[in-house]
């Protein structure tokens, strides 16, 4: 029987293959979550340079949210990453959910980033 961590790593490698095939000149929106915090960053196509980084630990978001591990925090992070991407003239990204299932906080973050102007 495989543990939940092993299953996530399998999903992560499967999804990374699909994401890397569709990058071709686009940026990657990488999302990570823990029980207490949400993290989102935009990487260039090589994946070596972080262009934008936003998390619930950022000063502007930390004051707005009560807890960093809920859907309200995910909405704030999604909006903040989209606004910072607009400032750097980034409009289209490839969504990388890092092996997390697309529901709950991950889905809410993606929806709020889309509503704020990111295309993926």
Image (cartoon, rainbow, N blue to C red):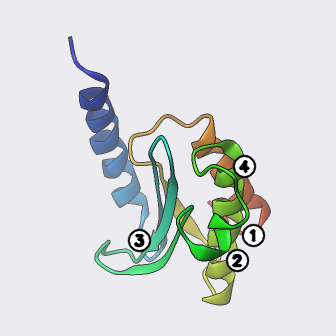
Query: In the figure, is residue 50 to the left or right of 75?
Result: left
**Disc 3 element:** loop
Of the numbered discs 3 and 1, the one sitting upstream in the chain is 3
Depth check, front residue: 115 or 56 = 56
Total marks in image: 4
Quadrant, the C terminus: bottom right
Quarter residue 24 falls in: bottom left
Residue at the spot of label 4: 72
Residue 79 vs residue 102, the one in the foreground: 79
Which quadrant is home to the N terminus? Answer: top left
**Pointer 3 residue:** 24
What's the distance in space between the residues labelled 2 and 4, CA to CA? Answer: 17 Å
Q: Which mark is residue 83?
A: 2
SS assignment at label 1: loop
Q: Nearer the viewer, residue 32 or 62?
A: 62
Q: Residue at x 31, y 40 (%)?
A: 14
**Which is closer to the viewer, label 2 or label 4?**
4
CB under 8 Å between discs 4 and 1: no
Please indicate whether residue 28 sits to the left or right of residue 92 in the image.
left
Q: Are marks 2 and 1 in contact (CB under 8 Å)?
A: yes
**Which secondary structure, mark 2?**
helix
The disc, 4 or 1, on the residue closer to the chain's N-terminal end is: 4
Q: Which mark is residue 117?
A: 1
Earlier in the chain: of badge 2 and badge 1, it is 2
Mark 3 Cα shell of 10 Å, populated few (<14), some (14-19), many (≥20)? few
């Amino acid at each position: 029987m495989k543990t939940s961590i092993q299953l996530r790593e399998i999903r992560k490698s499967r999804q990374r293959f699909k994401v890397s095939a569709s990058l071709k000149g686009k940026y990657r929106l990488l999302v990570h979550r823990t029980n207490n915090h949400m993290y989102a960053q935009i990487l260039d196509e090589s994946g070596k340079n972080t262009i934008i980084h936003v998390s619930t630990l950022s000063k502007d978001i930390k004051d707005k949210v009560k807890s960093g591990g809920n859907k309200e925090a995910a909405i704030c992070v999604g909006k903040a990453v989209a606004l910072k991407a607009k400032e750097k003239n980034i409009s289209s990204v490839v969504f990388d959910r890092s092996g997390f299932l697309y529901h709950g906080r991950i889905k809410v973050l993606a929806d709020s980033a889309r509503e704020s102007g990111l295309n993926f």
